[in-house]
Image (tube, rainbow, N blue to C red):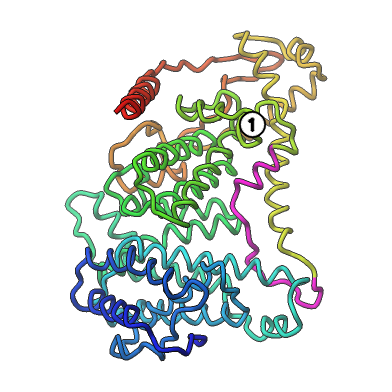
Amino acid sequence: MSGGSGAAVPSAVADFIFDLYIQTRTSHQLDEIELLYQTTYPELCEQYFNNTKWPAAEEVETHFSNDELFKAIYLEMRSRHMFASNHIKPTLKDRLEVWDVYCSLFDKLLACDDADTVLTTNWTFEILHEFVYQYQSFAQFRTSLEKRSDDDIQLLRENPEAWNCSNVLNYLSRLVQVSKIREILRAKRAEDVEVPQPPSSLHEMMGYFALICQSRLECLLGDYFSSLRCVDCIDFFDQNELFRTSIMAHTSLFYHTGFCYLMLRRYADAARLFSSSMAYINRLNKQGGLPKGYDGDQIVKTADKMLTLTAVMNRMIPGLHLSGEIKKQLQLKPGEKNRNLDEASEQTVKDQFVRAGPKFVSHAAPDYSTRANYREEVQKLQTSIFAEELRSQDSWPKIRSILRLYTTIGVTKLATFAETDPEDLRATLNSLLVRMTHRASPIGSDTTAALAESECRRVVLGTGAEATDVTALEPLIHLVDDMVYVHQKGREDRYEDFFLQQLLMCKDVQRSLM
């Protein structure tokens, strides 16, 4: 990858590259690798490369003995810095070269010829996370054709394989397959089953995080069921899962999976994931445990998006079970658009959905001869699907407020109270009963024990022989002839959230007095 500064490499940078090479390829001291990657590398970026790219590989290759695998790792770090910098504007040629960088890195890993490289979990996840981000960025770049020059259009035509969606998904799938990560996770949860051995610990981590990043990519493409299928072997509530060693991986997994649940009308599952992730992020934030700089800011923004999507779901399905802490956050700033949406208009709810949802992309290349802006089309498509769902449920809050007063009520009487036609009401109720019903595992939503692989899959996908039909509606209703039968869900009052919140407030007061 070309484009180095051309100046002499500072000694501190040369020492860093040499030390990183030795530690990742020979010494394998994780503490040292963590220090070099998480502390020394950002400091050098700030000191020497705030406005310029890192040196080209040809300028520093003597510091890592022309090691081809480390060269690919270095170039990936270099390209990631280039796109993260606010002072460097990448060109289309840079984007195409970055594709070659990732192809080179993954091809070498997939060949399994070298098992001597050690990276930290954060570093491994960030490589794959950036890979999907680069695809997303390129897909948005190539669909904004009104901004592209003739040279850019010609270059796009000449490189149809670069950042092709099928190729991106293929690399992620092959990393999963080579690492044997699905078989490993399945064997670890089973009894008396030999755990397969991956080519190396790096391959195992690459395969694991490839599952999460592939799930994210499927979500960005709007294929929500495939997104859930990618992570059907991961137990979201097992404290020993690898994603818990990386806050970025944890946040990405819970956000995109929760969003898929929302779009598949599994609102209770979405609320459970969002609540769990927001509580974890808020706890780390109060303890100062979030990463510094851009990564920490992105995690906080993602938590705010999850809160906004929770408010959207609460607007669509009143009575959604939320923890006391989440309810409190929704009421903290009632004047803000992203908080209490109970009385908000349809357009306001749609605006918040767009703001808090993923930035969708199309898997297909556009027609380069039209010079039109296709970037917003895929976003508008997913927003229209959500808007249709929103309109179909818009009458439910009013109907629900009436049904909560009855155990049985006639359709005609209910229609009178709801100020609508009885036949229209019957059609609305039947539509809600069908739309709000989905298959779910009988495993309780509050379980925290490690699950067997098959049970874990049922929790994510809602499949399996023991799965039953559940509804997101509260209260439960049954429509028989001209009568509506209402069953209020019994809910045990739980006060632990309240008392824990009061304890935290007491600690804050104590700290302020010290």
Q: Is residue 167 left or right of residue 344?
A: left
Category of crowding for the residue at label 1, using alpha-carbon neighbours closer than 10 angstroms: few (below 14), some (14–19), many (at least 20): many
Q: Residue at x 44, y 49 (%)?
A: 251
* Secondary element at tag 1: helix
Q: Which residue is mark 1?
A: 316
Q: Is residue 361 magenta?
A: yes
Residue 359 percent across, percent down from the top left:
62, 56
* Quarter of the figure with residue 37: bottom left
Residue 159: image location, x then y, percent:
62, 83
**Residue depicted at 55% across the width and 44% down the height:** 305
Residue 487 sits in quarter: top right
Q: Quadrant of the image for the C terminus?
A: top left
Vertical placement of residue 467 versus 43, above or below: above
Where does the image place residue 174, in percent across and percent down from the top left?
41, 71
Q: Which residues are magenta?
A: 349-371
Q: Which is nearer the eye, 187 or 159? A: 159
Is 318 placed left or right of 193 in the picture?
right
> Residue 509 lies in magenta, yes or no?
no
Give the prevailing secondary structure in the magenta stretch.
Answer: loop
Amino acid type at image mark 1: Met
Identify which residue is drawn at 60% across, 9% down: 407
